[in-house]
Image (cartoon, rainbow, N blue to C red):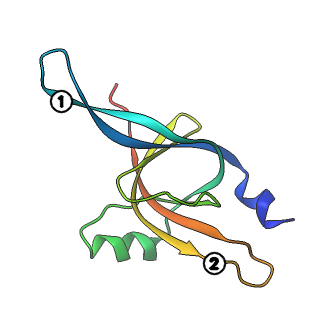
């Protein structure tokens, strides 16, 4: 099985937050699509990963692997009806048979019903 097929388990959309002027003259935060159709793999974060980020006062619930460059802290990823806020990323250059990829450490945001 190829690396590309391993990360292609889900199709994600990457969004960034933007401020726009609202009708009352103030500002409203909105999310705009930056990348769509991004292949990714979403997994629960390991206990070691959760603990590592907890020491940094950051909540991480999932690790998302993608080959999409440009994903940064504060963006969000939408996949399979779920929303994840990016807390941190690690860019991994190609080595041997493993191509370039980005490990995204994110917190899943539960929708309010």
What residue appears at the point 44 percent right and 73 percent down from the top-left corner? 49
| Residue 99: mark | none
Note whether 46 is above or below 86 in the view shown.
below
What residue appears at the point 30 percent right and 70 percent down from the top-left corner? 54
Which quadrant is the N terminus positioned in? bottom right
What residue appears at the point 75 percent right and 60 percent down from the top-left corner? 6
Q: Is residue 57 left or right of residue 64?
A: left
Q: Residues within 10 Å of mark 1 (few under 14, many from 20)?
A: few
| Residue 27: mark | 1
Note whether 101 is above or below 70 in the view shown.
below
Q: Name which quarter of the figure residue 91 lies in.
A: bottom right
Note whether 96 is above or below 58 in the view shown.
below
| Residue 112 position in % (x across, y down) | 32, 29
Question: To which residue does mark 2 refer?
Answer: 93
Is the C-beta separation of discs 1 and 2 under 8 Å? no
Q: Residue furthest top?
A: 23
What residue appears at the point 54 percent right and 67 percent down from the top-left corner? 103
Q: Name which quarter of the figure residue 83 lies in.
A: top left
Secondary structure at numbered mark 1 = strand
Front-most of residues 55 and 7: 7
Front-most of residues 111 and 15: 15
Secondary structure at numbered mark 2 = loop
| Residue 29 position in % (x across, y down) | 26, 33
- Along the polypeptide, which appears first: circle 1 or circle 2? 1
Front-most of residues 65 and 48: 65
Which quadrant is the C terminus positioned in? top left
Q: Residue furthest bottom?
A: 96
Q: Is residue 89 left or right of residue 92?
A: left
| Residue 43 position in % (x across, y down) | 58, 58
| Residue 110 position in % (x across, y down) | 38, 39
Q: What whole-number distance in Å separates the C-alpha atoms at marks 1 and 2?
A: 39 Å
Q: Residues within 10 Å of mark 2 (few under 14, many from 20)?
A: few
């Amino acid at each position: 099985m190829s690396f590309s097929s391993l990360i292609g388990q889900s199709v994600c959309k990457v969004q960034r937050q933007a401020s726009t002027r609202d009708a009352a003259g103030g500002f409203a935060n909105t999310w705009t699509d930056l990348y769509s159709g991004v292949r990714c793999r979403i997994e629960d974060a390991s206990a070691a990963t959760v603990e590592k980020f907890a020491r940094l006062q950051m909540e991480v619930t999932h690790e998302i692997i993608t080959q999409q460059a440009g994903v940064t802290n504060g963006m969000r990823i939408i996949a399979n009806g779920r929303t994840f806020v990016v807390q941190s990323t690690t860019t991994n250059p190609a080595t041997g048979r493993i191509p370039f990829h980005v490990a995204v450490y994110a917190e899943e945001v539960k929708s309010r019903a």
